[in-house]
Amino acid sequence: MIGSGRRKSIIFFIALGIGMIVVALLLYLGGIVLDWRAGVRLFFGILLLAVIIAGVVLNTIFLVREIRRNEQHDAFINAVTHELKTPIASIRLYAETLQTRSVDEAKRKEFYRIILQDSDRLLSTIEQILRTGRIGANSKPPNISPLNLSDIVAECASRARVLHNIPNEAIVCETAGQLQILGDLDEVRAAVSNLLDNAVKYSGANVQVLVATAREDEKYASVRVTDNGPGIPETELKRIFKRFYRMSGPLATRVKGTGLGLFIVRSVARRHGGKAWAESPGPGRGSTFVLQFPLQK
């Protein structure tokens, strides 16, 4: 959401732009009424009016975009700070407890498990940030090799179950056998993992995720991840793939993240000559994310 101060700035500049257009129109109309025979001045007056209107409109558009971009950047900084600070604080707390207190073996193992879990979370956040800096839609993946997409999906689903501590039936896999693609293993794995992590996080307490691979038109191998989460409004289906972008609403504020996951998904797809998009019947009706890669020829 845009802060009140920035919202007032947007309103101010929009009002200023409208005021300038009104003044220009009044001057223009007044010039026509008072001096309708001055054809040359009329022509240049029209030209000047068009330039003024275009300048005001462009200025307002760029201003609104810049304010929204700054708002997203601030939200990203806050999210990353939280994602880094929280696991570090947890690791420090449990390490200090193990160092200063005598705990039984069961508790000790539990503390070690939490420390490792928070370490994985910390490492995942750092990898997301570093990967975003490396990935560009126009550059090719650095380490291309033949990959079986179905195997990668099964591996990522298994990892997601362990990471989020959910039962096997919470993520159902339907794979279409051998789907050979040419790709960077690390990037393809990161894209599929991001889709699964999002599906689990936004499903709430009742996680029901279906991930399926398929061969489409003998040209593409696809991964479809369907969840029973809050759904996505139609106006948000394209925006959610932008860097730093996060949907507004009560659930979005509860689900932590950096706003980089779906940007990475689409960037990986494009770097491999594929596509990524989202589908949703609407709010409250779940969503489906589709990731496509060209099949190996």
Image: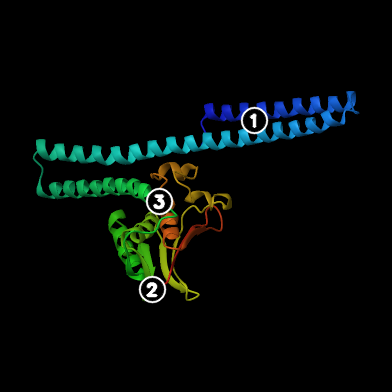
Residue 215 visible somewhere in the drawing: yes
Say what amino acid the circle numbered 1 marks: Ile
Residue at mark 1: 14
* Residue 56 or residue 287, whichever sits in front: 56
* Residue 40 or residue 210, whichever sits in front: 40
Residue at mark 3: 261
Query: Which residue is the extreme one toward the left?
Result: 102
Q: Measuring 42% from the left and 72% from the top, which residue is drawn there? A: 295
Say what amino acid the circle numbered 3 marks: Gly
Q: Which of marks 2 and 1 is nearer the N terminus?
A: 1
Residue at mark 2: 179
Determine the image quadrant of residue 82: top left
* Residue 119 or residue 126, whichever sits in front: 126
The residue carrying pointer 3 sits among few (fewer than 14), some (14 to 19) or many (20 or more) residues within 10 Å by Cα, namely many
SS category of the residue bearing label 3 = helix
Residue contact at pointers 3 and 1, CB within 8 angstroms: no
Above or below, 69 relative to 272? above
